[in-house]
Amino acid sequence: MKARKSVVVLSVILAILITTVAGAQITYEKPTITSYQVVNLGTNASTINADYYKSDGTKAFSNTFANVPAKGVVTVQQALESGLPSGQFSAVLSASEPLAAIVNQQLGDSGSGTSTAPFSSYGAISSGSKEVTIPIIMHNWFGYHTELFIQNVSGTPATVTIDYKPTSLNGCTTGTATSNNSAGTLPASSATSVSQRNTTAIAATGLTGGCNAFNARFLGAATVKSTGGDIAVVVNQYVQDKLFTYNGFSSTGGTTVVFPAYLRNWYNYYASLTIANPGGTDAQVTVTYTPAAGSNPTAAITANHTVPAGKSITVYDGPGTGASDLSTAYPNGSNNRFFGSVKIVSNNSVPVVAVVNQEATAAAGNQAGAYNGATSTEGTKKISVPLIQSDFYGYYTSLTIATVDGTDANLKITYTSDGTYSAVKNTSKEYTISTTNGVLNRYEGPTASAALSDILDDAAWKSGGTGRFIGSAVIEVVSGSNIVAFVNSESNSAPQASTRDSLYSFNAFNVQ
């Protein structure tokens, strides 16, 4: 995904709207419903048009949001869009001013604004490509599966095929490679879904000895290709009570990839790092993990890996894992813990792409989320964040910003509340703050201190005794390096939030 690219006037959303969760082993009491937040990045007010499309390319429903102010944000819940029938649709947003948007997935009921976990998020895009790299694909991977949502983002039909490529783990090949698997021909603006749950042809077979445990499973990468129109892809990774979502990569990646946040042993939270090589030459990469405040120990750690041509590798830092890049300095069962940034450098200049999955143990509510690494060239002096929450009916966000080169930057963050749900409506306020060791986190959760948050303890956002805030943010570099950012949005009060994944994670949008 190029979610950190320049945002243009037309933004495309791949949306899963009011549909049931499939799979005999994954069961919920409610259907899946989406919502989205769209922000006007321009300097003038604009009408935003939303068009929803069926799988045959015909229009199912349209909605219009008139006179959205500059920097203004609109929150749309499909459960409350009475003209939209039940089903699975794609959507296109358009306006006379530049837009950025993110989509949330959750369980719910038509006509109700109440959301039930598990949650996940992904970013809207402004353009697609003929080939999309998917770093993480799973079939029966110890309970985990994936599902691809593929949209034709052009005006001409797109004939789509998928190539699956297993990785290697502990010297074992984790699946069977297959090519040219048909995903059908997509009319303009339409979308389709392809689940790996029943794609048994990619499962490993005939493994013996220490590799036997990987039989009937697949872990690896995929390439989604189009003959005809450009496409974009969103990936759901799921197991009972957990849902991770990330955007496929429409580019070949970069020789330096940056992640603002990574965790190991972090108060029941952990992460995994998957690096994919879309090219035809093996990539020799160095991964540098730089601890942020609160980590112990505090020395940076580097590790070298080979990422085979056309394949991916995964570094897993969860409970019960064996050796990883961080396992020596931060062993499981110890008081050592890591929260910090990650930089991947391709030493032989072969471009790579990468995704981080972040998870929590059952003791921390089975939280789960994914986000895409940003190349150093995608970093900019300005970032748009379509969704920020503080004291919003139990929802809050954690915004993490990182400089692309690890040096520090002085930043200006402007928050703008929406005009419908916030306690103080249609209001903007600026805050000036700097990164430390190249990283800044702004946490609006209930345990946040004034030093960690911007909105939570500021009386300017309170009205009638409440500081309820939902809106957007723009981050600008006053001085220093270019930046990237991502957001975790979490609920501590949504139905079943204590036992299911109540975490939305998404990339912010870098704006030129």
Image (spheres, rainbow, N blue to C red):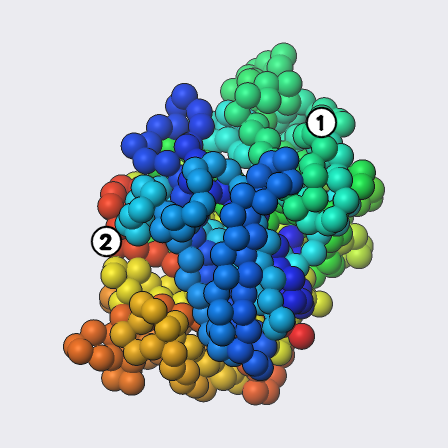
Could you say which quadrant of the image residue 390 lies in?
Answer: bottom left
Residue at 66% across / 59% down in the picture?
126
Residue 294 lies left or right of residue 250; in this view the side is: left
Residue 373 lies left or right of residue 420; in this view the side is: right
Against 322, residue 302 (above or below) is below
Q: Secondary structure at mark 2?
A: loop
Q: Number of numbered discs present? A: 2
Q: Which disc number belongs to residue 493?
A: 2
Q: Amino acid at mark 1?
A: Ser
Residue 462 coordinates in the image, percent (x, y): 24, 79
Residue at 40% across / 85% down in the picture?
429
Residue 323 coordinates in the image, percent (x, y): 51, 41
Against 493, residue 475 (above or below) is below
Q: Nearer the viewer, residue 291 or 455?
A: 455
Q: Amino acid at mark 2?
A: Ser
Residue at 31% across / 67% down in the picture?
421
Residue 475 lies left or right of residue 398; in this view the side is: right
Residue 162 coordinates in the image, percent (x, y): 71, 32
Mark 2 or mark 1, which has the lower sequence index? 1
Could you say which quadrant of the image residue 399 lies in?
Answer: bottom left
Against 310, residue 415 (above or below) is below
Q: Nearer the viewer, residue 344 or 189?
A: 189
Quarter of the image where the C terminus is located:
bottom right
Q: Secondary structure at mark 1?
A: strand
Residue 218 coordinates in the image, percent (x, y): 58, 26
- Decide if residue 17 is in sight here: yes
Q: Are marks 2 and 1 in contact (CB under 8 Å)?
A: no
Q: Which disc number belongs to residue 434?
A: none
- Pointer 1: what residue? 182
- Decide if residue 225 is in sight here: no
Label 2 – label 1 distance at C-alpha: 42 Å
Residue at 67% across / 67% down in the picture?
8
